[in-house]
Image (cartoon, helix red, strand yellow):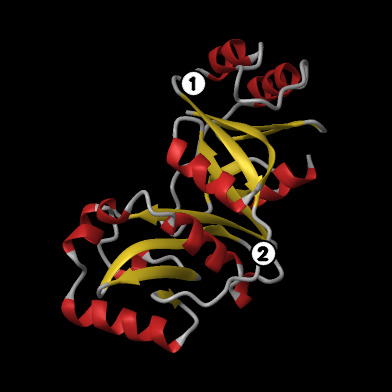
Amino acid sequence: MAAFALQAETIFRLDARLRIVGENDPDSSRGPLAFVGGCPGGVLVRLHVDVSAADAAEAERLAGSTPWSDTAADPPWLDPLMAGLRATAVERSQTYALDQRAMPVAAGLIRSDAPEGAALVRKLERDGMPTHLVEAGFVSVGDFWAPWCAMEEDGEIAAIAFAARQTVSGAEVGVYTFPPWRGRGLAATVTAAWSALPELADRTLFYSTTIDNLASQRVAARLGLTQIGASLRLT
């Protein structure tokens, strides 16, 4: 459970009671009603600050009543947990440990901590964001959440891995391959390169994927990542 506790501290802003105040992202999003992480060591629950004390106590009792760590089947307490919290949607994910790995130099890799990264930022600020980046939600260089590592092909950004969430102790990677370059293993390349960035050397790194994102699961398999367990986000 220690890994999920650290992941929760990484991806959420928590108060002194370990209640979710919001997402730990630059946008300060609200965050879910509940985050539940299940692994062979037990089940961890983190609840939003808006959940009442009575509802929180019942939610923790339910989640602790039956072990669960596999997204192949929902836990028996999911429906009553959602009903008690008045949640209307659930996102099911798998969480992996992303070990820092040596990455051979590859043509086209650009790191945010390198001169090439600074040059790329200046170019985008001067010339504007390419259409394919804007369509994917990268509307300014501020959406390149550092530290990041990008793969460039023929002068175009083809894939990027960035710090979707980070603290002094942990970081969770966000990965995106732009449509024209998908299916070529670039997501695994930038993810591995991101994990080797010196700025992340003292952090525990996480890679998460929703259960319906088969492409992201293939990245985890390609990198040989070890699955920590399964998680649920209730909203």
Residue 6 image point, x, y percent: 71, 50
Horizontal side of 49 relative to 90 (left or right) equals right
Q: Quadrant of the N terminus?
A: top right
Closest to the observer: 142 or 206?
206
**Residue sitting farthest toward the bottom:** 115
Q: Amino acid at mark 1?
A: Ala
Residue 114 image point, x, y percent: 47, 85
Residue 7 image point, x, y percent: 66, 48
Residue 179 higher or lower than 36, as above or below = below
Query: Which of label 1 and label 2 is nearer to you?
Result: 2
Numbered circle sitting on residue 87? 1
Residue 132 higher or lower than 196, as above or below = above
Q: Residues within 10 Å of mark 2 (few under 14, many from 20)?
A: many
Dot 1 or dot 2, earlier in sequence: 1
One can see residue 12 in this view: no
What residue is shown at x 50% (from left), y 71% (from top)? 147
Q: Residues within 10 Å of mark 1 (few under 14, many from 20)?
A: some
What residue is shown at x 64% (from left), y 49% (from top)? 224
Q: Secondary structure at mark 1?
A: loop
Q: Mark 1 to mark 2: distance in Å?
A: 36 Å
What residue is shown at x 48% (from left), y 63% (from top)? 190
Closest to the observer: 224 or 48?
224
Residue 127 image point, x, y percent: 17, 79
**Number of numbered discs overlaid on the protein picture:** 2
- In the figure, residue 144 lies in which quadrant? bottom left
Q: Amino acid at mark 2?
A: Gln
For label 2, the residue is: 100
- In the figure, residue 180 lies in which quadrant? bottom left
What residue is shown at x 55% (from left), y 17% (from top)? 82
Residue 216 higher or lower than 129, as above or below = above
Q: Secondary structure at mark 2?
A: loop
